[in-house]
């Protein structure tokens, strides 16, 4: 987790795919799906498709998704 300019936190990921024809977005979806053990079809980039900062939607039960994300992402300020 990294702090944002707005005072919140964001999950930072790095992919090597080039940002052409949606390749980087697809790489982000594949990476997060693998990391969280979810089907790629459950993760969609809903904002920032042409930006470095992405907004994603994960399909599922909110409480279950929150528990999954919290179990796999270090607390803000902690190193992974």
Image (tube, rainbow, N blue to C red):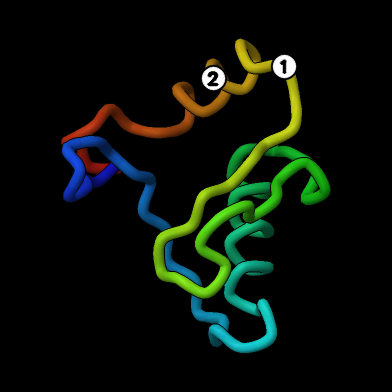
Query: In the image, is residue 79 above or below residue 76?
Result: below
Give the distance between the C-alpha atoms of the residues marked 2 and 1, in whole angstroms.
9 Å
Query: In the image, is residue 23 above or below residue 52?
Result: below
Q: Quadrant of the N terminus?
A: top left
Give the percent coordinates (x, y) of residue 64.
65, 14
Q: Secondary structure at mark 2?
A: helix
- Residue at 64% x, 41% y is 57
In this view of the protein, which residue sits in the foreground, 16 or 52?
Answer: 52
Give the percent coordinates (x, y) of residue 2.
24, 46
- Residue at 75% x, 24% y is 60
Q: Quadrant of the C terminus?
A: top left
In this view of the protein, which residue sits in the foreground, 19 or 69?
Answer: 19
- In this figure, which residue is indicated by the disc labeled 2? 66
Q: Is residue 44 left or right of residue 19?
A: right
- In this figure, which residue is indicated by the disc labeled 1? 61
Give the percent coordinates (x, y) of residue 53.
41, 61
Mark 1 Cα-neighbour bin, 10 Å: few <14, some 14–19, many ≥20: few
Q: Is residue 46 left or right of residue 73?
A: right
- Residue at 60% x, 49% y is 32
The answer to which of marks 2 and 1 sits earlier in the sequence is 1
Give the percent coordinates (x, y) of residue 37.
70, 38
Query: In the image, is residue 64 above or below residue 51?
Result: above
């Amino acid at each position: 987790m990294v702090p944002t300019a707005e005072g919140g936190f964001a999950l930072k990921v790095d992919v090597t795919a080039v940002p052409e024809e949606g390749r980087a977005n697809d790489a982000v979806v594949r990476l997060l799906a693998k990391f969280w053990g979810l089907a790629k079809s459950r993760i969609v980039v809903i904002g920032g498709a042409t930006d470095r900062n992405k907004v994603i939607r994960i399909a599922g039960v909110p409480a279950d998704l929150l528990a999954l994300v919290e179990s796999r992402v270090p607390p803000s300020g902690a190193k992974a």
